[in-house]
Amino acid sequence: MKILVAEQAGFCFGVKRALKLIDEFQRQGKTIQTYGPLIHNTPVLNDLAARGIGQVSPSDAIARDKVLCIRTHGIPRDAERRLRRRGVPLLDATCPLVKKVQKVIERLGRNGAPVLIVGDPAHPEIVAARSYARNVRVIDSLAAAQALPRLREAGVVAQTTLDTDFFRQVVAALVERCQKLHVVNTVCQATQDRQEAVRKLAERVDAVVVVGSRTSSNTKKLYQIARAKNRRALWIETADDLRRGRAAARLRAFRRVGLAAGASTSPQELDNVKKFLQKL
Ligand code: SF4
């Protein structure tokens, strides 16, 4: 079996940066906890927990003698202000590209015009981002965009991990609803690169294995793109998922298998899956 790895796969810049910041702080002897999961990848979170880096939720009593690390997705503006007021030492690991979206939302909403965010309203990045303007609506489907009342002026941005084709479709629908629409495509480059890589890969192979956690929004999009191009797309979290199920037996029959991974999947995990496939 030949294994072809997507040109762009695994850890993105924002995830690498967050983990590096944590390493540096831990080397300085600081005790760290994260405000919710740092990233959406279970093996990486397990590894952090094994190093004594646990998570706290907004409803927990947050200690002031530990450094509180803000997740890559960011947190709502009010929550951050409250923590600063209380004197909780913060390590801000919000991805700079997520911060950029927050700034764009703030700018677009400055004159009171509605800001439309295309994405998942329940995703922590969007929960945080929407706090940066007063008049925000989250659009999670084409139908929701088509159902909007007519607007004189609006701004529109995307969740950083959105499928770029979906963003274009929604913007096309919004153009029909808004007299003046300010569009800022905020899908991050790492997401676009991984989506493009899996699109190309899925057409060249008999089956595609996408590696990443179920909670990872960008991995889900990669899987959906792979599946649209190749019916034999499979989504796993770790090599163990292949060991347990019947997938390995099915993959054995193929000559060329593609391997892709979400932006929060570690190189080690990708390598584990590759080695497992090589032995089939
Ligand atoms: S996927 Fe993009 S926005 Fe999200 S952490 Fe990675 S680089 Fe930042």
Image (cartoon, helix red, strand yellow):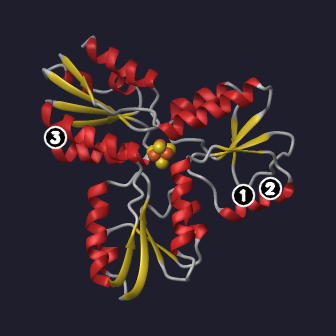
- Disc on the earlier residue, 1 or 3: 1
Which residue lies under the disc numbered 1? 80
Task: Mark 1 and mark 3 in contact? Answer it, CB < 8 Å.
Answer: no
Q: CA distance from mark 1 to mark 3?
A: 43 Å
| Quarter of the image that includes the N terminus | top left
Which residue lies under the disc numbered 3? 230
Mark linked to residue 236: none
For label 1, being within 8 Å of ligand 1 is answered no
Q: Is residue 10 above or below residue 119?
A: above
- Disc on the earlier residue, 3 or 2: 2
Name the one closer to the observer, 37 or 80.
80
Mark 1 packing: few (<14 Cα in 10 Å), some, or many (20+)?
some
Task: Mark 2 and mark 1 in contact? Answer it, CB < 8 Å.
Answer: yes
| Quarter of the image that includes the C terminus | top left
Q: Image point 28% across, 18% down: which residue?
A: 277
Residue 267 lies left or right of residue 63; in this view the side is left
**Which amino acid is tagged 1?**
Glu
Asked whether the viewer can see residue 232, the reply is no
Mark linked to residue 84: 2
